[in-house]
Image: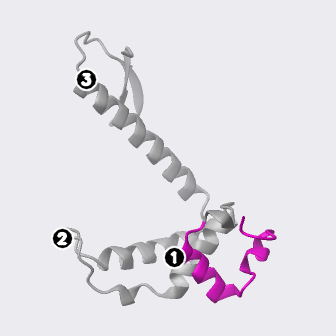
Amino acid sequence: MSDKILDLKNKKVVSNNNNQETSSSSSKEKKSVSEELFNNMREKFLENLSEEDKEAYQKFGEKFHKSFNVMTGETIDLSNISMEEALSYVVESLKSGLHPKYLDESERAMMQAGYGEEWYKEWGCDNLD
């Protein structure tokens, strides 16, 4: 086992003086590293967004979280999230470098509805293969 652990509260790696580390603490350590990686990626993403994009993501997130009951997972009202908003997030993903072939069927259908039959050519692709 590693002799260092990640201290998320203070955002630093510290020595582990406890030689009797259990598998559950090792699991927590791995989870902490995963969380730290996710948080670093999220922060870097947010740093590179324009204020307009941040506001759009914030509004979409608010609508999304209001669209289902967190305790039961049941939907409340999906009409709050418009097709245009969903399409704009797919477009932003493509602008950020996602290759069109990695979109799922519903995302491809939205792109086709919004940009036409050969929508993928907008992003420099000849086909989706």
Rendering quarter of residue 97: bottom right
Going from N to C along the chain, the mark reached first, 2 or 3, is 3
Which residues are drawn in magenta? 103-129
Please say if the residues under marks 1 and 2 sit with CB atoms less than 8 Å apart: no
Please say if the residues under marks 2 and 3 sit with CB atoms less than 8 Å apart: no
Q: Which mark is residue 95?
A: none
Please say if the residues under marks 1 and 3 sit with CB atoms less than 8 Å apart: no
Residue 49 placed where, x, y %?
59, 63
Q: What amino acid is found at the position of numbered circle 3 in the picture?
A: Ser
Residue plotted at (27% across, 80% down): 75
Residue at the disc numbered 3:
23
Residue plotted at (22% across, 74% down): 69
Circle 3 packing at 10 Å, graded few (<14), some (14-19), many (20+), is few
Mark 1 and mark 3: span between their CA atoms? 42 Å
Residue 76 placed where, x, y %?
26, 83
Residue at the disc numbered 2:
72
- Left or right of 43 on screen, residue 76: left
Mark 1 and mark 2: span between their CA atoms? 27 Å
Could one spot residue 10 in this view of the protein? no
Residue found farthest to the front: 129
